[in-house]
Structure formats: C-alpha cells, structure tokens
Amino acid sequence: MTDPPEAPPATEHPDPGAHTDPPGGPDLRQSRRGSGAVARAVEALPRSVNGRAATAGAVASALLVLAIVFGSRLLHDFDSALLPYAVASVFLAFGVAYRYTVWVSAPAARRLFVSGWRSFFSAENFRKAPTALPRMIATYLGFQKFLGARSHARWAAHQLIFWGCVLAALITFPLTWGWFTFTSATGAGPGYEMRVWGFKIVGFDSLDFLGWLMFHGLDIAAVLVIPGAAYFLRRRMKDRGAMTGQRFAYDMVPLLALVIISVTGLLLTFSSIFLHGGGYEFLAILHMVSVVFTLIYIPFGKFFHIVQRPAAVGMQLFKYTSRQDDEVFACRRCEEPIDTGAYVENLRGTMRDLELGFDRWTEYCPRCKRVLRGNAYLSQVKKGYK
C-alpha cells in the first residue's frame, strides 16, 4: 500500500466524500435518484433537447397510429369498444419517446447508451463472445438474477410481476390495436380461429385446454401479478428501510394500479361465469379506467424503468467486453481493483461533461475517497479550531 497522497486544497477539488459510490458508471436510474448537479443539468436542458423529444414523441405516436390502421386492415378488425385503450397506448408512445429522448440527452445516460449500442453492434465482440448478449438478456433482463443477490423473496415477487405484465402486454396490445382477432369457425359451435393481420394462425376448440388458455390468458397474468404486487405493498408498509425513502405517487401508486387492474380483470371473469353478467358493465368501466390511467402514467413514474431496463443490458455488455480486452484499473492509493480502464474513463468523461470539477477522483476506490475526505477535513478545516 502506498502512502496517502497529500490532501488537495479545498479550492482545487470539491469534497470527494460526497460521491463515495463505486465508480462503476452512473446508475441508469438517475432519473429518480440523480445528484443535484445532474438534476440541474436536466432542468437546464436547451430548447433543442425538448424540441427533439417532442418530435420523437410525435413520430412515435404517428407510427403507432399508422400501425393500428394498417395492422387492423384499415380498421376492419378494430374493435371500437377498445378505443380508449388504443388512445391511451398512443399517449403512452408519445410519453415514452419524449422522456427517453430527454433521458439519453443527459451526459451520463448518453455515454452509456452509445457505448452499449457500440458493443451491441460490434462484430469483434460477437466473434470473441457470441453467447454474451443472449446470456445477459436472459439473466439480466429476463430472470433478473441481480435481484436474487439482494433477497430471494424480492426476486420471486419481481418475477411474478414481470412475467405477469409481459403476458398481459402480449395479449392486450395486439387485441387493442386489432392486430389479431378470434372469430368463430363454425358460426355456432365451439370452434374458433386465431387470425393475425387477417391470416389464420391456429384453430382451436374453446372447450379444450388450449381454448381455455386462449381465453383466460389475462386471468393467468392477473394471478401472477397480485401476489407479487401484494408482497411489495406489504414490504413498503412494514420495512423501515423501504418506508424511509418511498414516495406515494412514485412507489405506491404503481403497485396499487397493478392490483386494481388484476382484481377488476378477475372480477369480470367471475361476473360472466358465476353471476351471469351481473355488474359486468360497472366492472368493465372500472377496469378500463385503471388500465388507461396506468398506461398514461408509465412515462412519468416508476414504471418507466421498464423502458430503461433494456439499456442496462447494453451497459452490462459494455462492461463485460471491456473486461475481455482491458486490464482492471487499480486505485491510485490502495491499488485495489476498481473497474476496467474503459469504464473508468467513461465515468471521467461524464464528470467532465457535467462540469463537476473532480473527475480525477474516479481513480480512487470508495474507501480511499472517504480517507482522503477525512485528511482534507483535518488539514483544511479542523486546524482552524486548534
């Protein structure tokens, strides 16, 4: 271990102890927990960024409208009863495109975004590690193994919510947009045909197991989501650590929305089977309102991390490929490994872009940053009280 370097004057570098997170790169969830400097940078976005974001949102909405029109064969297969859902999905497309554009315009996110896509399209990376990308998609995006390291219960609950929402989205959006339809094959019998863009894909009997799965896919999704959302609701009402930093609109509303959507969806099935349609209209309106609210809410709340998460796969791929080609960067003080040289340089460049003025501290590990902060305090502040 080398001797600690002399603490720099307070006027040269800001306090390193205020940034003691491992310099493994800015967190992709910076939109929620970003530092004050990042928040100020986002607030001070030039009009050109907002203009590009609005343009991206308008283009995404227009493309979705065209996809609905042509995917439903000029609205021939479009169900007018599902119009509120379709309109909400158009607003969803605008909000997601707008916020995503603003997000990737921030220096930290932009650098990781570009580096991730560069790694994704790199032929050399594919040649060296052809299975790296599919493995990361499966483990990081699909099964989210990083959550298992925190808590097996949280991982299981998150998996229930994730796969339930994926199943619901795969069924709801194509049906809402008129992309696929279920039509009776015989006119009166139990035979049905599933058609995608007007083309017959599969025929099935509504009374057999396949038919039951076809017509109860959303019920299965609801059964998966409810216990997962209930677990996190209970945790946010009982766990002191979760309660300390939570915000009702950000943390609780998404979970409550998932529960309401799932419960009202199951009650629709219950009403049609056991109550002969009693209360069905009221439940249908309540379910529609909850779904529309949730779709519009996605770009502005915690659900936005669903859109951000795929970018994290590119970040992980960038880190993985950097480790294959570059030596691990060691702390200048204790010589403990920090991360790859490419990743440390990426973080240093981000700090320069944000004009934070202390990019050199990326060369120290979190422990040494704390030690240097203490030395700076003793040499620059404490001595004035002796």
Image: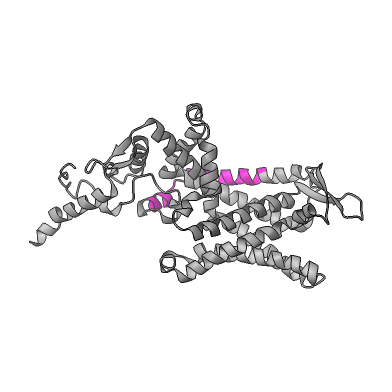
Spot occupied by residue 170 in the image (x, y as percentages of width and height): 67, 50
In the drawing, does residue 297 fall left or right of residue 78?
left
In the image, which residues are magenta? 38-63
Q: Is residue 50 magenta?
A: yes
Q: Residue at x 69, y 63 (%)?
A: 288
Q: Which residue is drawn at 14% across and 55% down?
A: 378
Spot occupied by residue 375 in the image (x, y as percentages of width and height): 17, 52
Seen in the picture, residue 302 relative to 359 is either above or below; the reply is: below
Spot occupied by residue 272 in the image (x, y as percentages of width and height): 79, 67
Q: Which quadrant of the rendered structure holds the C terminus?
A: bottom left
Spot occupied by residue 267 in the image (x, y as percentages of width and height): 72, 68
- Whether residue 301 is visible here, answered yes or no, is no
In the drawing, does residue 331 fall left or right of residue 31?
left
Viewer-proximal residue, 88 or 366? 366
Q: Which residue is drawn at 67% across and 64% down?
A: 289
Seen in the picture, residue 3 relative to 218 is either above or below; the reply is: above
In the drawing, does residue 263 fall left or right of residue 232?
right
Q: Does the magenta stretch include residue 221?
A: no
Viewer-proximal residue, 159 or 121? 159
In the drawing, does residue 118 fall left or right of residue 342?
right
Q: Which of the 4 image quarters holds residue 297? A: bottom right
- Whether residue 121 is visible here, answered yes or no, is yes
Q: Which quadrant of the rendered structure holds the N terminus?
A: top left
Main secondary structure of the magenta stretch: helix
Viewer-proximal residue, 148 or 13? 148
Viewer-proximal residue, 64 or 314? 314
